[in-house]
Amino acid sequence: MLILYRNKIRNNMNRTIFLHFFIFYGGILLAQETTLRQTIGQSAAEYLNAIGDESALYYGNLQEDLPRATNHPYLHDQQYAKARLTYLGVVYPEAMLRLDLRRQELVVLSPDFRNIVLFPENVDEAELHGLRVIYFQPDHLPGSPSAGYYCLLHSGNCKVLERQTASLNRKDNSANVMEQYYIISTRFYLYKDDAYFTIRTKGGLLQALQPYQKELKRFISANHLSFRKNPEEFLVQTVAEYEKLTGMP
């Protein structure tokens, strides 16, 4: 009887010790979990507070990694640059943007350093690297170019659009090792009289700007404009002069 009584006391003591252990350490674990949840909740609140009204801007797909190459396919620079962005009618004066010419993706850097692809249909325009970038949707007009991001070089009664694209190519280097590199291609388009013209040469532009070829040739010569050396300047100034000649606003 005495042995059974001692065993009963010992078992009760063990249960008591286990219960105290469970309460003590269980309380610590519960407190740690509560603290972790509070920390996560606080971090989320701080992030949402940081982006504020810009939350719609940072909702989208993450940009996929690019293939390894010796150069980059971005407009001017692969690094993010401050840009004035109008997105869903809201102006963001200092958005960090870069434009992927290969995949035609305008990418924004979020406050937590994620590369987020903007929905193109929501992009009104962006002023990036001193250029006015728009997302163009094809329309029913003759000669309409394909969908994608364009630089709007001139916007009057006539419009001048520049489209840059990047394609990935391969070659063997001096050590007979295969390398990948991007080739940047540029095309220019003129919108005039409810039609689009693909402009590849000086003559092509003058042909589209009838009937003022003689006047425009004199203007081009007097201002030393060259389509080959600086096609952007050539197109913008020549089209602006055409608008003056025709009395367009």
Image: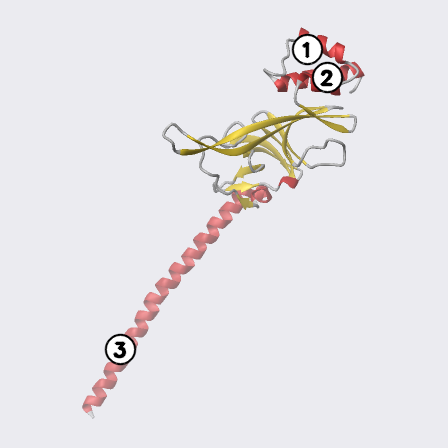
Relative depth, front residue between 176 and 237: 176
Label 1: few (<14), some (14–19) or many (≥20) C-alpha neighbours in 10 Å: some
Tell me the kind of residue under disc 2. Leu
Q: Which residue is mark 2?
A: 206
Relative depth, front residue between 30 and 61: 61
Tell me the kind of residue under disc 3. Asn
Q: Do the CB atoms of the residues marked 1 and 3 lie less than 8 Å apart?
A: no
Q: Nearer the viewer, mark 2 or mark 3?
A: 2
Residue at 47%, 51% in the rendered image: 42
46 versus 224 height, above or below: below
Q: Nearer the viewer, mark 1 or mark 3?
A: 1
Q: Quadrant of residue 87?
A: top right
Real-space CA distance between mark 2 and mark 1, rounded to the nearest whole angstrom: 11 Å
Q: Secondary structure at mark 2?
A: helix
Q: Secondary structure at mark 3?
A: helix
Label 3: few (<14), some (14–19) or many (≥20) C-alpha neighbours in 10 Å: few
Q: Which residue is mark 3?
A: 14
Residue 98 at x, y percent in the picture? 54, 33
Relative depth, front residue between 192 and 2: 192
